[in-house]
Amino acid sequence: MSRMIRSIVLRPAALALTVLFALLAFVPAAHAERLKDLASIRGIASNPLVGYGLVVGLAGTGDNLQSAQTQQMVANLLGRRFGTIITPQQIKAKNVAVVMVTTRLPPFARIGGRIDVTVSSASNAKSLFGGTLLPTALKAGNGDTFAWAEGPLMVGGWATDGQSGSGVSKNHPTVGQVPDGGLVAKELGFKLSADKPLTIALDRPDFTTAARVAEAINGRLDAVVAYASDPGTILVEVPKSKRRDLVRLVANIENLDIEPDQNARVVINEKTGTVVMGADVEVMPCAISHGALTVQVDERKEISQPGPLSGGDTAKAQRSNVEVTEDGGNLTVLERAPTLGQVVGGLNSLGVSPRDLVAILLAMKQAGALRAEVEVQ
């Protein structure tokens, strides 16, 4: 007779929770940050560009003969640029790949400047290793061409196939980069102007933070020139003494130290059981009871012997015994915790797993015992 026991415990050890809380307990208090890390000047932003081109020089790892778009593009290139008339069906080369070329044009990039471009396979190429990007127009959303890209690719991976159909690959061989491969052909046209206020846009709108930014700017310039029009926007009138030196004005403003205000927030990811709490989270006095459920399955294989002279056959029998145990879940009282360390200590004393903690925090929020916003991902 053989015996096998399977145990399923629906409450795992709280080691991950302990480590997470131990790290959170040492989170420093809010500190000042540079304004340039909290906001940006409206209008000063990069512009995405995209192009559709060809990569040549591949060692048989390009698009296969089933790629109609590759055949058509090669035929168009030979016909329009070199006067070679050829039908798409006559294209048999496997050292060519159709690619998408992407980049971001910096806000103050000038004609003739260089930018990096990323090249990604757009068909069924196996690898772009060793390829060269042919000149490709990079266009913005309005259809205008702002740059041209070309040059040899740098690919951080490779792939090879055997005759039996098996293959070996490393990293991601169908995406590469061309450092300084983009040549700026048209400028965005954005210019700083002293005739209208500078608009500072906060990355995370907040009334308190916006007020602090305006106050700090006025203090730095020793004049009332900044005011918050809404929680995410601060307008700065350009003083007459700074109208000819806007670059220095912006440099002075963006390097101001600002202490951003944050809402008390708890972020919960139910899929992974991850819980992250901010430093301003408070817990009011409450009582919590949370039990655990254990399921134990005892499986046995038994051999049944027939009686004497019965003429029966020996048979195998499977016998299962299922036991369910539910712990009584003691009632735990959490005192008021005005600091993150006390919140961590109180919740960690429950000895629950991260997934159990998700349900506890949501219940505490509904009961009004958790003073924080709860965001469930």
Image (cartoon, helix red, strand yellow):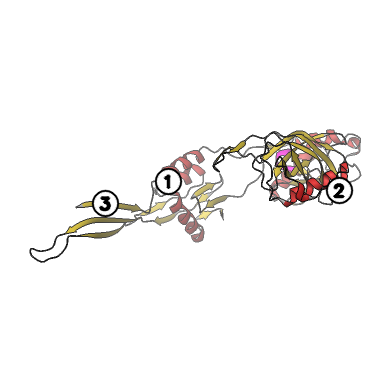
User: Which residue is labeled 2 in the image?
Assistant: 144
User: Which residue is labeled 1 in the image?
Assistant: 348
Which residue range is magenta in the image? 35-39
* Relative vertical location of residue 274 with respect to residue 181 in this rendering, above or below: below
How far apart marks 3 and 2 lie (CA) works out to 70 Å
How far apart marks 2 and 1 lie (CA) works out to 58 Å
Place residue 35 in its image quadrant: top right
Relative image position of residue 98 (x, y in whole percent): 73, 45
Relative image position of residue 103 (x, y in whole percent): 76, 41
Looking at the rendered structure, the number of numbered marks drawn on it comes to 3
Q: Is residue 104 visible?
A: yes
Dot placed on the residue nearer the N-terminal end, 1 or 3: 3
Is 69 or 302 nearer to us in this picture?
69
Dot placed on the residue nearer the N-terminal end, 3 or 2: 3
Image point 23% across, 56% down: which residue? 301
* Relative vertical location of residue 247 with respect to residue 97 in this rendering, above or below: above
Dot placed on the residue nearer the N-terminal end, 2 or 1: 2
Instruction: Say whether residue 164 is left or right of residue 192.
Output: left
What's the amino acid at mark 2? Asp
